Amino acid sequence: MPSPASVVRAGIACGVLAPLWWVTCIFGLGLFVPGYSLSADFISALGARGSPVESFMVYGGFGLSGVLYLAFACAAAWQMRHDRWALGAALLLLLTGVARIATGVYPCDPGCSPVHESNTQETHRQLATAGYLLMMAAAGMWAARGARHAALKPVIGWAIGGISWSAVCLVMMFVQPDWQGLFQRFAGLALNAWVVVLALCLWHPVTGPALTLNPAPARRRKR
């Protein structure tokens, strides 16, 4: 029977695997769809009804990556269990995984056309938007915790940079609709990079005690 430390280590490893697997899917699966453009077409079109890779994207892309995020969120929560704000940040990551899975459950229409979209596609769009917002909120909270935990300091720059870069890319999707697919992927890359950094920061302390807050500086007594 695996030890608790091994289970937590496996969960934290999912924090590296989830982003890498997701990036592989959103860039690689388009090669198997005739006429699909990585620069112009949305990621969701890969899992749209009737797509040649629909099942793989729904179960392997949205589903598996979402499950990996759930596992990582649970491991991160255990490792940071002495910090209630970090537990809240882990909860946001968990909700991101749930949103990712649910996004695949409600696929968009063929081509993800915004004209006369079905109720299923509308739900898909709302879940996808919620997933981006949850990931950005999680990045902000983990960056804040990095200021209190020495082991998490590398997360600060990556998280803030990911939020900023993804926000720019999401705006550019509307400014340059011909390149909306590429900007959407760049936004996803930015929001997944800091997760890898967080997982690497949590990896080494996993066999020791849970991370605790840095002690507050001692106040000098007035003479």
Image (spheres, rainbow, N blue to C red):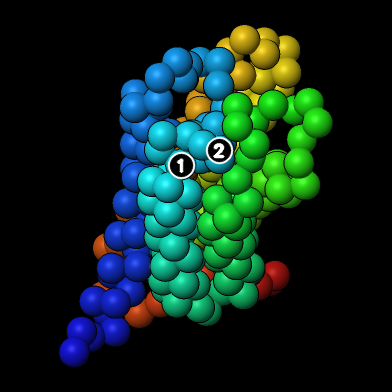
* Residue 54 circle label: 1
Q: Picture coordinates of residue 58 (x, y %)?
A: 47, 49
Which residue is identified by label 2? 48
- Separation of disc 1 and disc 2 at Cα? 6 Å
Name the secondary structure under disc 1.
Answer: helix
Residue located 73% across and 18% down the image: 174
Q: Mark 1 is on which residue type?
A: Glu
Q: Picture coordinates of residue 180 (x, y %)?
A: 61, 19
In this rendered view, identify the residue nearer to me: 62 or 87.
Answer: 62
**Marks 2 and 1: in contact by CB < 8 Å?**
yes
Q: Is 9 located above or below residue 82 in the figure?
A: above
In this rendered view, identify the residue nearer to me: 49 or 139.
Answer: 49
In this rendered view, identify the residue nearer to me: 48 or 6.
Answer: 48
**133 with respect to 166 (left or right):** right
Name the secondary structure under disc 2.
Answer: loop
Q: Is 181 located above or below residue 92 in the figure?
A: above
From the image, which quarter does the N terminus lie in? bottom left
Q: Mark 2 is on which residue type?
A: Ala
Q: Picture coordinates of residue 101 (x, y %)?
A: 54, 57
From the image, which quarter does the C terminus lie in? bottom right
- Ranked by sequence position, the earlier of labels 1 and 2 is 2
Q: Residue 136 is drawn in which quadrant?
A: top right
Residue extending furthest toward the bottom:
1
Residue located 69% across and 26% down the image: 113
Residue 101 seen by the camera = yes
Q: How many numbered circles does the render carry?
A: 2
Q: Picture coordinates of residue 159 (x, y %)?
A: 54, 42
